[in-house]
Amino acid sequence: MANERSQFPFPYQPYTIQEEFMRCLYSALDQGKVGIFESPTGTGKSLSLICGALSWLTDFETKRKQEAAALLEKGQTSLSPSDPEASAQSLSTEPDWITSFVQKKAERDLVSKLKEDEMKRQKREERLELIRTNVQLKYAMKRKSCDEDEAFKLLQCTKEDQTDVAANQDDEDLIIAEYESDDDSKSKSRFCVGEDEEVDELVEEHVTKIYYCSRTHSQLAQFVHEVQKSPFSKDISLVTLGSRQNLCVNEEVRRLGSLQRINDRCMEMQKNKHKRPHHDDDAKRKRGSAKSGCPYNKISALQQMRDELLGSVHDIEQLLKLGKESHSCPYYATRLAVPPAQLVVLPYQMVLHEATRRAAGIQLKDQVLIIDEAHNLSDTLSCIHSAELSGAQLCRAHSQLSQYAERFRSRLKAKNVMYIKQVLFVIEGLVRVLGGKVGQNPQSQTTEAATEMLTINNFLFRAQIDNINLFKLHRYFEKSMISRKLGGFVEKYVGSGVTPHTPIGSNKENRRTEGLNRYLQSLHGTQSTAPASPNDQQGSSEALAASPMMQVEGFFMALTNSNTDGRVVIHRQGNLSESSVKFLLLNPAVHFAQVLKECRAVIIAGGTMQPVSDFKQELLFSAGVREERIAEFSCGHVIPPENILPIVLCSGPSGQELDFTYQNRDSPRMMDETGRILSNICNVVPGGVVCFFPSYEYSRRVVAHWESAGVLTRLANKKKIFQEPKKANQVEQVLSEFSRCIQRCTQQGGGSLTGALLFSVVGGKMSEGINFSDDLGRCVVMVGMPYPNIKSPELHEKMSYLDKHLTHSGGKSPGQALIENLCMKAVNQSIGRAIRHRSDYSSIVLCDRRYSRPATLTKLPAWIRSRTSTHQSFGPGFAALRKFFVEKKQNVD
């Protein structure tokens, strides 16, 4: 019988639907279910997740403590002298002393284990309590960091004077360690701060915890802020995980920019920190200054920061600040904090990808996993486990690895040489499939334009690499870390002072790597003989330094999937450089199955999870989850029904039928009619109007037509016009200007302007995770239906796979259902941007007659569907819109 709970700690009086949400969540966690929870944005979903899940965790820990105490008491009692009469009645054939000894030993072992666990728990709780109450620790850490910072600066000044570096010593860093075994033996964990015995002292046993993951860092930060506002903020041990790019505080490393460069540099610094001194008489090896480790990665500082993290709740910004103050690394400190943490907050990819999970020290066994914003979970899994390689990348990888093997040929073990030759052979096969040859400039090699879709086995036969054991190659990549070694090799001999423009023969090292420099330069098309400026040289060096071997390793791993679970797309573009091979994962359930199997309970949550039936078919049933293990919860919105007006328009003001199918949407009549609809809407809607187009390209064509026809000028007379930028770093600026304009118009009066109009794209940067609350989004307009490109070979193959492996339902094949579901999921995400809290109100205008189909309407969220009205002609629909805003204005006045 599952435990139940009726009251939950909450920062304020919860809504009824929040109480229902928390009760269902508590029950699902207690019974070890896979829960699908749907709660619209604005209904306090995050707080409900926090308070419901942490209430369960608190009760679970209390219950486990009580059970352990009872077992301990029982065990100690049983170890007391036994009743002689009971012993005499034993019917065992073994001598009494043997039976008694075995029983007593088992009981002593159990009591010893219980005592040890209890001591660990008490020690952990005492340490956390000390951290939470002893604020002096922070000042001690600051003093320590100042001392270390001063010492580090002095050390750097000393190093700048030492310029004589031995080339041979540097090369030691690039040699692949001897690779002796192909067995799947368990390798020693290289968790956290390096391959050192000190690490064992830092690693703790994992406590029962909740892993919370979401799609973006901003969503994770928002969740952490909700935890800080919750009643659990003072008692919960929370840690936020992120990439080195997000958490590194070493400016020397941060300025490298790209994630791969930051990772490689960080790993190199860890290795230098833990490297043992060479006891060699070779004078060359004794010359020069030793490379230093990272000054932020000191054991004592990491331990202190770990305890500080566990003592109070920090978001990523606070982590960075704390890391700089305490002079310790947030990236490694957060990983040290994972085992004792009760709540771990992290991005999707770190949980859903097995290798990343291992690297981050995440253990899912018997733990709780909450996946928020999970409406795109299937697509996310497919993307994470897919891989693509261009012809240029393959040729670069082959060239770099060949040069590496040649340079260190005399110092590599035979086993390493054999595997390197196999990797080169596979790369040659992949280039051959694309119609090219290695050793030549890929930009000058022409290929016959074509696209092919092959099963994994057929692709291996086509590339003539079916006799290579890719599983062994994958293990070799993992254990030898050849990708990182090659990255360091390229950076050293291309990106670190040896540029393609350095005169031949200027020194010994340049002569050694002249061929590599010249070839890599040709791959980038930089064959100009004109002298380059220093800035050009720097940019060229950065471009050339990156090694594609990581991508090659990922593609090799993808090819180890089951033949039925994926396809390989061969895409020839007319020239080898731009042609590509891509692995497409068709069955995301195969990688989700391990997560579902290991976790005690999995909660999949989102603002809208419709249609749930297809979600269950593709991800849960295919992963072996039985119906009885699935729990579902769906709730309406907290806003009053009269605060939302969703309408479907089948015709425009001039009577033109709204049919934005691919064949009709480009007609000038359709574009003009859309302009008239928007013009009318802007006349009656105050504040902000957000108009979503199916794609960037269609948005560009429509806006260009409106500009030439004068429609844009008419719109601009009522609303200031903004357009969604294609570059992510410009989104914030556009949103800020959009917001300021609306605020100015609604509060101070903008003359003839009543607000602003924003042109966005479905599936773009503003269709998800952006809040258009209150005056920012009084009306959301959907132009057409954003169906995916049916001509895409990847989508066509996915449809065929579903038709073959899933059951038909509702008179439609699974492939057809996929198309409609992808479309309506995107629509639901976009139209959900406007209603963000209980007092908010907004209208939704769906411009396409196809929205009126009953099968399409059923795919809208229930709280929107129940209020949706369909209008065959424009007049009644527009009248309802005008009335809606007149009433809202009267209520405000």
Image (tube, rainbow, N blue to C red):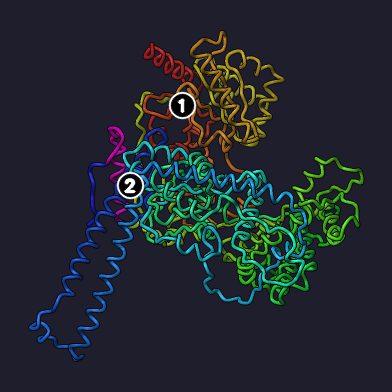
Q: Is residue 579 left or right of residue 530?
A: left
Q: Earlier in the sequence, mark 2 or mark 1?
A: 2
Q: Which mark is residue 54?
A: 2
Q: Residue furthest left?
A: 85
Q: Position of residue 101 (x, y in %)?
A: 23, 83
Mark nearer the viewer, 2 or 1: 2
Q: Residue at x 69, y 63 (%)?
A: 173
Q: Residue at x 52, y 48 (%)?
A: 328
* Residue type highlighted by circle 2: Leu
Magenta span includes 13:
yes
Q: Front-most of 840 and 334?
A: 334
For the stretch drawn in magenta, the main secondary structure is: helix
Q: Position of residue 750 (x, y in %)?
A: 55, 11
Q: Position of residue 292 (x, y in %)?
A: 64, 55
Q: Front-most of 723 and 306?
A: 306
| Residue 588 appears anywhere in the view | no
Q: Is residue 529 above or below residue 703?
A: below
In the rendered view of the protein, which quadrant contains the C terminus? top left
Q: Is residue 517 left or right of residue 831?
A: right
Query: Quick one: label 1, few (<14), some, or many (20+) residues within 10 Å?
Result: some
Q: Front-most of 342 and 410?
A: 410
- The image quadrant of residue 403 is bottom right
- Please give the range of residues in magenta: 9-31
- The image quadrant of residue 134 is top left
Q: Secondary structure at mark 2?
A: helix
> To which residue does mark 1 refer?
773
Q: Is residue 149 above or below residue 462?
A: above
In the rendered view of the protein, which quadrant contains the N terminus? bottom left
Q: Position of residue 856 (x, y in %)?
A: 47, 38
Question: How far is the residue under mark 2 from the one under mark 1?
Answer: 29 Å
* Residue type highlighted by circle 1: Ser
